[in-house]
Image: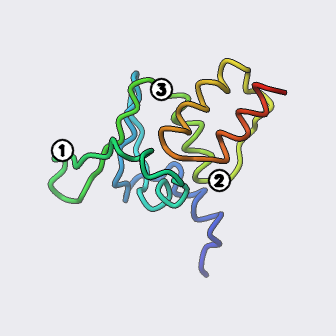
């Protein structure tokens, strides 16, 4: 039986067997799938920091460097990209401002819009 797209993405969120993208924050790294991350990128300049990584010879890996973001913020955005929704109720104004900046760098317009609503009420 085929997986529904949402259940497949939910499974892939924590399964990095076929990950081909590394999201590097200031305090750590997360693996991801390019096809899922890039399907939500609406701003080409948001992926300008994309570089080929030679760390793995078995497959093509890519790196997005996010030096101003913290790992838990990158994880929050990754969760949104895979699941299509996250629990926004616990996001503070300070966190929303940081998430807005991160989403801008990645070109994820919806996250920026929600963060604007949190910051400006």
Q: Are marks 1 and 3 in contact (CB under 8 Å)?
A: no
User: Residue placed at 43% from the left, 55% from the top?
Assistant: 33
Q: For the residue labelled by badge 3, is the local secondary structure a helix, a strand or a loop?
A: loop
Tell me where residue 2 sits by quadrant. bottom right
Which badge, 2 or 1, is on the more N-terminal residue? 1
Q: CA distance from mark 1 to mark 3?
A: 22 Å
| Residue on which disc 3 sits | 69
Q: Which element carries disc 2, helix, strand or loop?
A: helix
Q: From the viewer's perspective, is the residue at label 1 or at label 3 nearer?
A: 3
Q: Which residue is mark 2?
A: 83
Q: Reading the chain from its start, which is encountered first: label 1 or label 3?
A: 1
- The percent position of residue 118, horizontal first and vertical second, equals 78, 29
Which mark is on residue 38?
none
The x, y position of residue 36, in whole percent, is 50, 58
Residue name at image x 43 percent, y 49 percent: 32
For marks 2 and 1, give the CA distance: 28 Å
User: How far across and how far down the image is residue 6, in percent?
Assistant: 65, 64
**On screen, 3 above or below 52?**
below
Vertical arrangement, residue 28 with respect to residue 6, above or below: above
Mark nearer the N terminus (3 vs 2): 3
Toward the viewer: 28 or 50? 50
Q: Quadrant of residue 76?
A: top right
The residues bearing labels 3 and 2 have C-alpha atoms spaced at a distance of 21 Å
In the rendered image, the quadrant that contains the N terminus is bottom right
Label 1: which secondary element = loop
């Amino acid at each position: 039986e085929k997986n529904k797209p949402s259940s497949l993405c939910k499974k892939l969120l924590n399964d990095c067997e076929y990950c081909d993208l590394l999201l590097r924050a200031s305090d750590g790294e997360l693996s991801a799938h390019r096809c899922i991350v890039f399907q939500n990128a609406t701003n080409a300049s948001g992926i300008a920091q994309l570089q080929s990584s030679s760390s793995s010879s078995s497959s093509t890996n890519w790196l997005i460097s996010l030096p101003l973001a913290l790992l838990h913020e990158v994880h929050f955005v990754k969760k949104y990209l895979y699941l299509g929704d996250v629990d926004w109720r616990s996001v503070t104004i300070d966190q929303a401002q940081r998430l807005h900046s991160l989403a801008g760098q990645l070109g994820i317009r919806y996250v920026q819009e929600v963060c604007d609503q949190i910051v400006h009420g």
